[in-house]
Image (spheres, rainbow, N blue to C red):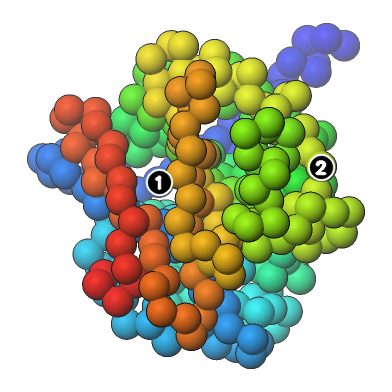
Amino acid sequence: MNNRFAIFLFLSFIFFFHWSCKNTNSSKKNNTYLHLSHTRTEADDTIDSLTLDIDFTKFEMLWLGGDLTYYTSKKEATLRYADSVYDLGNLNTLWSLGNHDYADKSLVQKFTKRPPYYACHKDGITYMVLDTQDSLSNITGKQKVFFDKVTDTLTASSHLVILHHKLIWLYGNPDLEAKIPTVSNAGLGDCFVCLNPNNFYADLYPELVKIRQKGIEVLCVAGDIGTKIKEFEFQTPEGIHLLASGIESGETGNKALVFKHEVAARRLTWRYRLISEL
């Protein structure tokens, strides 16, 4: 029975991990990636107008932090519109679902051809996309098995980049939890749109520290900000980077995160850029 269970876990890992990022030309030395979040307006079928002016072809990868529109997956027409902007099925478009994207996960999968959480590897970096809506900010059940399988087998990457919507690492951190009302779009509470009490520090963080101790840089990049602040960055004492970017439609000063990846040097740097300057 134990052997059967081990085979099941292995096959489950293969299923979730085989979603590949699209490799770039091996001769390319530098890549640029964009993290963009909370581009919704108050209308069902629209995306922030400044966002629509971004030339996404300048970036080798697009990391979406969720809440693309007000009800992204409620109607296929809305998803088709979001797809026309973000190219959701592109293997280099990574999308961590937000609460405003979550009406119909099967419809989302029709466009992305990927499950709500998965991992891929590209140019020396391992990416893990988590679904923080699945268990109200907690990573449990099959998703926790998936997380453990990826982290247990990670050895050769220069970086692990974890993309997720809710700022799950604010809760339970003595330096950060008090900042929830002034940082996170969602307040702390017990509801679907809330930042819920969760198991990040109990179950996920110790594994991330082990990865960091192997010499692999770890970045957790969230997307549920923008209404209160335009950028957030914190490094834990153990060297884990906690980042978030998001916008509030119609406001000035909206920013996105731009990453520069020096592939041969295995170096990843980032800075916040005004949306109007992208």
Horizontally, residue 151 falls left or right of residue 58, namely right
Task: Examine the rendered structure and indicate whether residue 271 appears above or below residue 155.
Answer: below
Q: State the quadrant of the C terminus.
A: bottom left
**Residue 73 is drawn in which quadrant?**
bottom right
Disc 1: CA contacts within 10 A as few (<14), some (14-19) or many (>=20): some
The image position of residue 251, as x and y in percent, is: 47, 81
| Residue 46 visible in the picture | yes
* Nearer-the-camera pick, 246 or 179: 179
Disc 2: CA contacts within 10 A as few (<14), some (14-19) or many (>=20): some
Task: Examine the rendered structure and indicate whether residue 260 appears above or below residue 80.
Answer: above
Q: Disc 2 designates what residue?
A: 197
Task: Examine the rendered structure and indicate whether residue 53 appears above or below residue 125.
Answer: below
The image position of residue 21, as x and y in percent, is: 40, 46
**Disc 2 to disc 1, how far (Cα)?**
32 Å
Marks 2 and 1 close (CB-CB < 8 Å): no
* Nearer-the-camera pick, 138 or 128: 138
**Residue 4 is drawn in which quadrant?**
top right
The image position of residue 147, as x and y in percent, is: 64, 30
Q: Amino acid at mark 2?
A: Pro
Q: Disc 1 designates what residue?
A: 21
* Kind of element beneath mark 1: loop
Residue depth check, mark 2 versus mark 1: number of the one nearer the observer: 2
Horizontally, residue 161 falls left or right of residue 140, namely left
The image position of residue 134, as x and y in percent, is: 77, 50
Q: Residue at x 81, y 34 (%)?
A: 141
Precedes in sequence: disc 2 or disc 1 = 1
Task: Examine the rendered structure and indicate whether residue 27 appears above or below residue 144.
Answer: below
| Residue 108 visible in the picture | no
